[in-house]
Structures are given as C-alpha cells and as structure tokens.
Amino acid sequence: MAAPQKPLQSTGLDSRLRDAGLFVQQAVRTFRATGAVAPSSRALGHALARFVDEREKPDAPLAIMEAGAGTGAVSRVIAQHMREGDTIDMVESNPEFAGRLADQLATAPDLNPIADSATVHQMLVTDLGTDRSYDVIISGLPFANFTAEEVREILEYYFTVLRPGGHLSLFGYLYTKQIKAVVAPREDYLRQARSSWVVEEWVNRYGIGTERVMANLPPAWIQHLRRPEE
Ligand SMILES: C[S@@+](CC[C@H](N)C(=O)[O-])C[C@H]1O[C@@H](n2cnc3c(N)ncnc32)[C@H](O)[C@@H]1O
C-alpha cells in the first residue's frame, strides 16, 4: 500500500511563485499601470527600505506609505525593517494585487506579523487624500509609463503628505530610455523623456542619494529624496 501523502504545505517559495504568476498575468493585461515584468527583488526592497532603517529619532515610530505595492514583494522586505509602533499604508490600484496583498497579510508568515499595523488601500495613490502625513514614502509606481503631468501630480502629492524632514525613495529601470530610443515609437520615447525630466527636476531640488541595484529584473536605479525642514 502506498504511504499516505503529506498535505502540501504552503512554503515561501510557493507563495512567491504564485505572486510571480499573478504579476506576469497582470503585466500582460495592464502593462501601462503595472510597468514591470516581475515583482521586485529582495535586494531592491532592502535598498528602498533604507529610511525605515536609518531614523533620525530611533525611538519614534514611523508612519510609512508604500505606493504601488503590487503583490507585496517590497512590502515583505519593508516588514522586516519595521519596528514596534510603526504603521504602513499599502496603496495599490489593481484590485487583483490589492486582494492578494490583503490575503497575504492575513496568512503569510513574512507579512502577518505586521498585519495589525498595515492597511491596504485599493485606489490610485492620489485618491488617498491629504489629511495624512508620512515619515517615509516608498514608491513603486512605474513613472516611465506615465505622462509628465501624471508624474508631476503624484510627486506633488507625495511632497504634500510627506512631513518636513521625511524621505521619499522611488525606483525605475536602467537603460529603458536608451532601449526605447531604438525600438519604441517616437511619441512614446518623447513621452518617457518628458516624464523623466519631471523626476529629474524633483531630484535636483530634493535628491540626497542615488543607488543602482543590478540584482533585479531588470536592473534598477533608486533615487532618495528628502523634504526640507520648514
Ligand atoms: C512596478 S509595479 C511594482 C509592484 C511592487 N511594488 C514590486 O516592486 O514588485 C507598479 C505597481 O503600481 C501599481 N500602480 C500603478 N499606478 C498606480 C497608482 N496611480 N496608484 C496606486 N498604484 C498604482 C500597479 O498596479 C503595480 O502593482
């Protein structure tokens, strides 16, 4: 007689594979909003979570916002850097991703410990309202796919809800402009160039550091910005 089979346990790997599958499916359906072919790597997550670690006041809890949380690849890493009393708003416009994230907060061993401190908001980040304030904003939004006006509106929103002295970390992918210059229609190349100039304008005003993360698909750049004290 065959030995009784053990029930299949959900491992971290199962969960990451399911996330990757959902991500690719949604990337095919909604590439403009999703803006990536795979969830971010842990290396990118750790680099983005820098100001959850580096705190001006080590004992003061942080209010954190993650914009464009997707299936939670970066959220899981942020969770590792959070301390008691910290809170996080995870904002995600895609209902499939937001639903998956809420399920994972309830059940996944790497997200469940922060479930009581986390809120998933299924909406556009600019619809979250201005009656709130954050110490750290981590943005996963695919600015390269947006118009210059959309990027400006979102950056203005971030700097409205970021407290003076607070940090914004955002990322994009290396070499996309160069690749688009060769393969994309001229209007799309120009649209991306214009939206990247808006990001550059904010980096010139508020940038405090940049990083490259090669261990990501595709390799990524990060910009860290700080809202000046008033
Ligand atoms: C590049 S993916 C990043 C996902 C995840 N943070 C990661 O790193 O794997 C961008 C995410 O932003 C979401 N998104 C796009 N525009 C948005 C908006 N205006 N407000 C909130 N989420 C948005 C997309 O649905 C997608 O999940």
Image: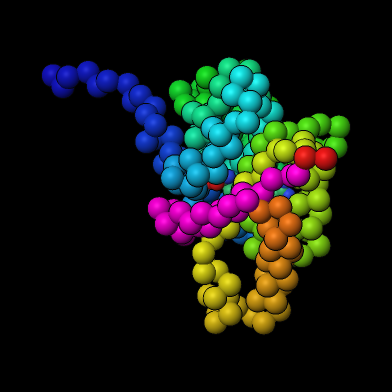
Can see residue 215?
A: yes
Q: Is the magenta stretch mostly helix, strand or loop?
A: strand
Vertical order, 40 against 196 (above or below): above
On the image, the x and y values in percent for residue 67 come to: 67, 42
Vertical order, 189 against 46 (above or below): below
Q: How is the image coloured?
A: rainbow
Task: Tell which of 215 and 184 is nearer to you.
Answer: 215
Query: Is residue 16 found left or right of 209 in the rendered image?
Result: left
Can see residue 124?
A: no
> Which image quarter holds the C terminus?
top right
Quadrant of the rendered structure where residue 101 is?
A: top right
Quadrant of the rendered structure where residue 66 is?
A: top right
On the image, the x and y values in percent for residue 192 come to: 67, 70
Residue located at (77% from left, 51% from top): 154
Query: Is residue 5 found left or right of 56 in the rendered image?
Result: left
Residue located at (70% from left, 77% from top): 190
On the image, the x and y values in percent for residue 133 come to: 78, 32
On the image, the x and y values in percent for residue 54 come to: 56, 34
Vertical order, 172 against 62 (above or below): below
Query: Is residue 165 found left or right of 3 in the rendered image?
Result: right
Task: Tell which of 197 and 73 is nearer to you.
Answer: 197
Q: What stretch is highlighted in magenta?
A: 208-228
In the orientation shown, which residue stands out farthest toward the left? 1
